[in-house]
Amino acid sequence: MKLNKRLLPHYQKFFKNTNYSLTKTLKVLLKSEHFFDESNFYSMIKSPYDYVFGIHKELDSFNFKIRNYKQEENGNFSAPDRLTNPETRKWYIGSIMKWPLNNQGMLIGDPPSVSGWPPFYQAPVYDLFWINSVTLLDKSSFAERIFKYGLHMGDDYTLLADKSDYLFTYQNNEDIDQLLNEMSERLLSRPISEQDKTRIISNSINGADKSHWTDLVRSFKAFDEENKGPIEKIFENICLKFLHLGNTIYFKMKRRDFLHNLAHVASVPMIYSSLGLTNLELQDLLYNSGSTKKLILIKLDGGNDGLNTLIPMSKLSELSNARPHVILPENKIINLGYKRFRTSPGV
């Protein structure tokens, strides 16, 4: 929450008068009208910790069903004690969370410095540090993996979500329009555009009438198990579209402000959401444009300083002033044969 500067003296005085009591000051702050100011809604990008644990909590991963397809095919399935015992199950689920947290830049207990993670203190970017070309893709693929393929627990065992059970956690599950509205509020904390809603419905039920979804759900509720497969397939497709649309960005910000702040983060080559381009629109560009031209996205693993990879020579003096300890000296920059850009000898 960003506190209005004119309010700071008031809370500073209260903090001092209460003998520097954090408890009393926070109680006043959290009960104030300023804490519930709408300008603070959707104003932060979730940290990897909040995002990963939030997905697990939303899908109730602790109660996923234990599957072992090899044993099931041979007719000798037996669940191991480590996954049936609640205490050891917690440990195993917790241990596999380390991988996505590390990939998204926040391995708990291992911050980059004694100051912690830059998004919590580094002005002016703050939480925008969580977003770059690597972490954005990993957040999206993490949500897809856990919902579609479950949690791999070793020895061919998988904890798998029951998608129909998850569907019925939504109150308006029979009407697909109301279902999408409820999912928008619950998963994205904001409504999606009518255009995106139409695309999700059309792609999920393959152009069928909306009543087709209603009939499937009502039939399944009447114990028609044959409809469980089709329902779960359609609902999986809907959920994946939502997970891609959300893509971990939960903030209300003008696009111009977002791009301005993003400029401080030099290594963000493909934040298509900041350009107002949703995943569904991206798919249209890739597959449905009718053009032979294709948009190719290249994911590069590892650290990379974008402004030292392709150095804009017209901005060299400004970069030298702004980044004196980072920018390469001019005599070490490699000439590419172009006047506008040069590159690092390490490339």
Image: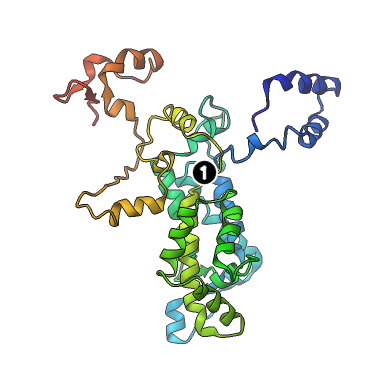
In the rendered view, would you say 38 is above or below 155? above
Task: Categorize mark 1 by other alpha carbons within 10 Å: few (<14), some (14-19), many (20+).
Answer: many
Instruction: Say which of 297 and 304 sits in front.
Output: 297
Residue 175 position in % (x across, y down): 58, 68
Q: Which residue is mark 1?
A: 249
- In the rendered image, is residue 145 in sight? no
> In the picture provided, is 168 more to the left or to the right than 314?
right
Q: Residue at x 47, y 34 (%)?
A: 255
| Colour scheme of the picture | rainbow
> In the picture provided, is 149 more to the left or to the right than 335?
right
Element assignment for label 1? loop
Residue 162 position in % (x across, y down): 55, 71
Say which amino acid is labelled 1. Answer: Ile
Q: Quadrant of residue 109?
A: top right
Quadrant containing the N terminus in the rendered view: top right
In the rendered view, would you say 239 is above or below 269? below
Residue 282 position in % (x across, y down): 35, 50
Q: Residue at x 22, y 52 (%)?
A: 291
- In the rendered image, is residue 110 in sight? yes
In the rendered view, would you say 290 is above or below 224? above
- Report the number of numbered marks: 1
Instruction: Say which of 240 and 59 sits in front.
Output: 240
